[in-house]
Image (cartoon, rainbow, N blue to C red):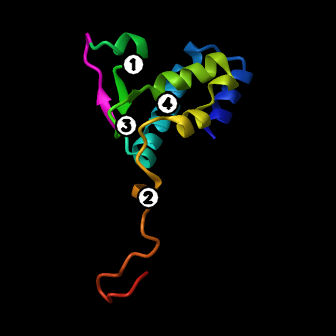
């Protein structure tokens, strides 16, 4: 879905500066998907941190295995480079994700009042 949105911005002929806020928001969404679905956490990259100039942003996501990824920058890359920088593929190929088993949510949650499953 995010790939399509970014491609729409590209096709509209806007420059990167024209859509910088939108790209930041879409990159934050991609990062939040990593947090919720892959077990990542948002981390601050303080001034002087080795990755900050490379990532171009003061935040990143750390995967459960400790690797740090840059969803904000990857979203900008999708805008500037195009389909070769697929965000969907980025999510699917990231190393260090929490296992699918750990992400599962019970399909039925017991009702506290009745003791029955909802």
Q: Nearer the viewer, residue 5 or 82?
A: 82
Q: Which residue is mark 4?
A: 27
- Disc nearer the start of the sequence (4/1): 4
In which quadrant of the rendered view does residue 80 lie?
top right
* Residue 3 coordinates in the image, percent (x, y): 64, 33
Rendered image: mark on residue 63: 3
The magenta region covers 41-48
Q: Which residue is mark 2?
A: 101
- Split into 4 quadrants, where in the image is the N terminus? top right
Q: Residue at x 35, y 15 (%)?
A: 51
Q: Calculate the distance from the C-alpha at mark 2 to the C-alpha at mark 1.
A: 32 Å
Q: Are marks 2 and 3 in contact (CB under 8 Å)?
A: no
Q: Nearer the viewer, residue 54 or 72?
A: 54
Q: Which residue is mark 1?
A: 57
Alpha-carbon neighbours of circle 1 within 10 Å: few (<14), some, or many (≥20)? some
- Disc nearer the start of the sequence (2/3): 3
* Residue 54 coordinates in the image, percent (x, y): 41, 12
Secondary element at tag 2: helix
- Disc nearer the start of the sequence (2/1): 1
């Amino acid at each position: 879905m995010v790939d399509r949105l970014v491609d729409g911005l590209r096709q509209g002929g806007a420059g990167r500066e024209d859509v910088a806020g939108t790209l930041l928001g879409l990159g934050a969404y991609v990062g939040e998907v990593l947090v919720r679905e892959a077990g990542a956490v948002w981390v601050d990259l303080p001034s002087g941190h080795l990755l900050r100039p490379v990532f171009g942003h003061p935040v990143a996501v750390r995967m459960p295995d400790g690797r740090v990824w840059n969803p904000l920058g990857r979203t900008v890359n999708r805008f500037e480079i195009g389909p070769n920088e697929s965000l969907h593929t980025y999510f699917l190929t990231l190393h260090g994700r929490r296992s699918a088993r750990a992400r599962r949510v019970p399909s039925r949650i017991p009702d506290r009042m009745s003791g029955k499953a909802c």
